[in-house]
Amino acid sequence: MVAKRTGVLTSVGLIWLVGCGGAEFGEGIALTADRQVAIKPDGLAAGVDLPAARGFNVAEARSGQTNAASGAAQADPNGRASASAKAEQGGDAWAEFQLGQCYVHRSDQAAPVEITCKLGFDASASATRPSGTQTAGTVALKLFVKGPGGAILERRAVLQESCDEGTYDRATSQTSFRLNVEFQPQAVYYLIVAGRVAAASQPDTQAEATLSVKELNLSLKAAAK
């Protein structure tokens, strides 16, 4: 699906200074041991499809705002999430979510794993500004795999747009990724889709951004050595 754009689209660095932005947003996720799910060699051999009946064990959301602005986010273990930010009169807002699975590899041997991600989403951003002001609505969506020691083993950008004048609309779209990662013995892994929106305004401007994950499916299986 082709996105519709009206006006000017640019990268506005100040957006990522609101909250914990930047390309690394969402990657600080960390679950306590009691929330991690064990996966064993026989489970990988049979294959795992998520969210299945139990849902994802990572479904986190947070937001923030200043002055005349509002941010909101939610994440559902069944594979849906959303974030929105709206700002005017000099306010700033941001919202983000993390959705996916955290595994601990219960094996004494390393195992190559194939991960498939299927994702449905939509997004929008808009801004109004007099010439020369910094106002923008920004939206970003990505998939990442985090492994031992917090190392990011894979990071795949799905969407990153910033609109500083006019509108950006991405109708419901489908995308998929296939990744290969080696699970080390007794190590913890995060398979996460993360989304973030932000809006920044000046006293006489306004901006808005929205992002929705309509469907997320992850599958894991042992890969050939």
Image: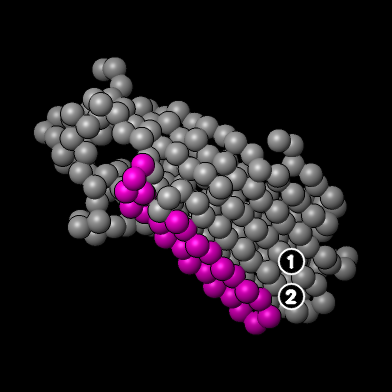
Could you say where residue 129 lies in the image, as x and y percent from the top left?
A: 84, 67
Q: Which mark is residue 207?
A: 1
Residue type at mark 2?
A: Glu
Marks 2 and 1: in contact by CB < 8 Å? yes
Q: Is residue 189 left or right of residue 91?
A: left
Q: Earlier in the sequence, mark 1 or mark 2?
A: 2
Q: Which residues are magenta?
A: 52-76
Residue 101 pos. (x, y %): 35, 46
Q: In this picture, is 157 found above or below 20?
A: above
Q: Is residue 193 magenta?
A: no
User: Against 182, is 128 above or below?
Assistant: below
Who is closer to the viewer here, 117 or 13?
A: 117
Name the kind of residue labelled 1 in the image: Ala
Q: Which residue is mark 2?
A: 88
Q: Can see residue 202?
A: yes
Q: Residue at x 59, y 70 (%)?
A: 71
Dot label at residue 224 = none
Magenta portion: prevailing SS class: strand
